Image (spheres, rainbow, N blue to C red):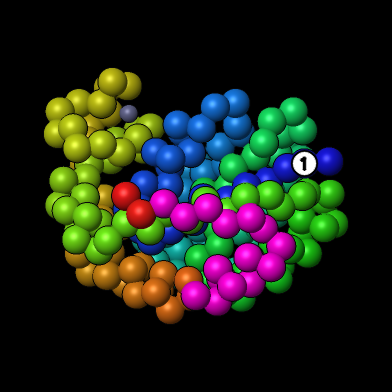
Amino acid sequence: MYLLSIVYGPPLSGKSTFASKMNNINHISVGKICRHESSQQSFRGLYLKHAILYNWFIPSQILLPLVLNNNILSQNQENVLDGIPKYSHEINPLKKLCKNNKVNLKTLHYLNPPLDILLNRLKTRRTCNLCYKSSTNTNLCSCGGLMITREEDSMTYFLDRYSRFQNHSAIILEKLSSFMEIKTYVD
Ligand SMILES: [Zn+2]
């Protein structure tokens, strides 16, 4: 049996940072897993490479089994999912997969800082091109990688992701609150 919590919020709300500050958890970063998979010369890898590049919707049948499987889920620690759901229609497949794999859904950590904070972060955000760690650091990453502004952090891309968040968040929160405990954070 597995225990699964979710970190949810708009782009740049600090989901990865939040998860990395939680103690004794298994952080499941959907972005990291997808980027790793997109470097593989498989059909799924090539598909994901283009999906990330062009901001495509990635179907639940591809995404969910990639990030929630026995190799990734931990039995000994609470698992914390970061990056799903983004769309309201992902909730039912997520629920179904959890039921079939004996995954108990626990807490939804909802990060909801004001838009001006998100826009401020957007201006200063850099991401390492090797380990994908994000910070405001403009020098080299501690791993030796370059801190670059990702395509995903351009204003156009951000506004696109933000409006998607706004279109789906009310339904996602409503659906998830019927079987998960919701904790909200506003800064
Ligand atoms: Zn790095």
Left or right relative to 180: residue 124: left
Residue 14: % across, % down: 36, 47
Ligand 1 quadrant? top left
Please indicate whether residue 13 sits to the left or right of residue 179 in the image: left
Q: Residue at 22% of width from left, 55% of height from top?
A: 117
Tell me: residue 78, above or below residue 10. Answer: above
Q: Position of residue 104 (x, y in %)?
A: 77, 50
Residue 7, placed above or below residue 141: below
Task: Find out whether residue 174 is within the magenta segment.
Answer: yes
At horizontal 39% and vertical 38% (from top left) the residue drawn is 17
Binning the other alpha carbons within 10 Å of mark 1 as few (below 14), some (14 to 19) or many (20 upward) gives some
The residues colored magenta run 170-185
Please tell me which residue is depicted at 27% across the width and 61% down the height of the picture.
Answer: 114
Corner quadrant of residue 127: top left
Locate the N terminus and report the quarter of the image it occupies. Answer: top right
Residue 60 lies in quadrant: bottom right
Q: Is residue 46 visible?
A: no
Could you say which is closer to the camera, residue 173 or residue 83? 173
Residue 19 is left or right of residue 146, and the answer is right
Report if residue 131 lies within the magenta region.
Answer: no
Q: For mark 1, what is the residue?
A: 2
Residue type highlighted by circle 1:
Tyr
As drawn, 57 above or below 106: below
Between residue 82 and residue 22, name the one nearer to us: 22
